[in-house]
Amino acid sequence: MNKGQFRRLVRDLELPRRVDVAGLCAAVGRRLGRPVVVRSAHLPPDLPSGLVIVTSAHFVIFLDALADSWLQDGIVCHELAHLLLGHHVEPVTDPDATRRILPTLDPDTVLRALGRTCYDESSEHDAEALGTALFSLLNPWPRDDARGVPRGDPDVIERIERALGSE
């Protein structure tokens, strides 16, 4: 895909100017016709730091619970990009991979539920590019993160942004 196609995909999500990960997940869920749920898990070190499990009712993004919060946001954006690009439609066929991801479940059951966990170089490149574009849209100062702003003045960041012409 090219940059124009990525921009079109992002524009078609009809995101608000200030968006967070939950808003991105909701927009992608609306576009794909089923909710996107994010869960953290202690993923084995030999697996990716994020993966998508596809069920008939949801897309579930699992991300590494040990990753820093900013990295978790990046992982979610990357997995959302895979979903938007349609990479989830090819099933995993490796029972050993399923045992490593979800060791307490029957591998055949997991194989029926999992999306892909491995992508070719082109798919990974596209997901990385689109995921980076999504990540760049995230609001760097969520309202629930005071970032040292006094409690009595919760709108100070927005006022500074307006004064700088960035709102």
Image (cartoon, rainbow, N blue to C red):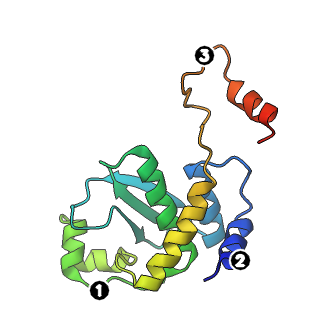
Which is in the foreground here, disc 2 or disc 1?
A: 2
Q: Is residue 27 left or right of residue 81?
A: right
Q: Kindly state the secondary structure of the residue where label 1 is placed.
A: loop
Q: Which mark is residue 62?
A: none
Q: CA distance from mark 1 to mark 3?
A: 53 Å
Q: Which residue is mark 1?
A: 93
Q: Secondary structure at mark 3?
A: loop
First-in-chain label (1 vs 3): 1
Determine the residue positioned at 56% across, 57% down.
Answer: 135
Q: Is residue 158 toward the left or the right of residue 26 in the image?
A: right
Q: Is residue 151 above or below residue 27?
A: above
Callout 2 crowding tier (Cα within 10 Å): few <14, some 14–19, many ≥20: few
Q: Residue furthest front?
A: 164
Which residue shows up at 41% across the image and 68% down it?
A: 52
Q: Which numbered tag is attached to residue 4?
A: 2
Vertically, is 7 above or below 137?
below
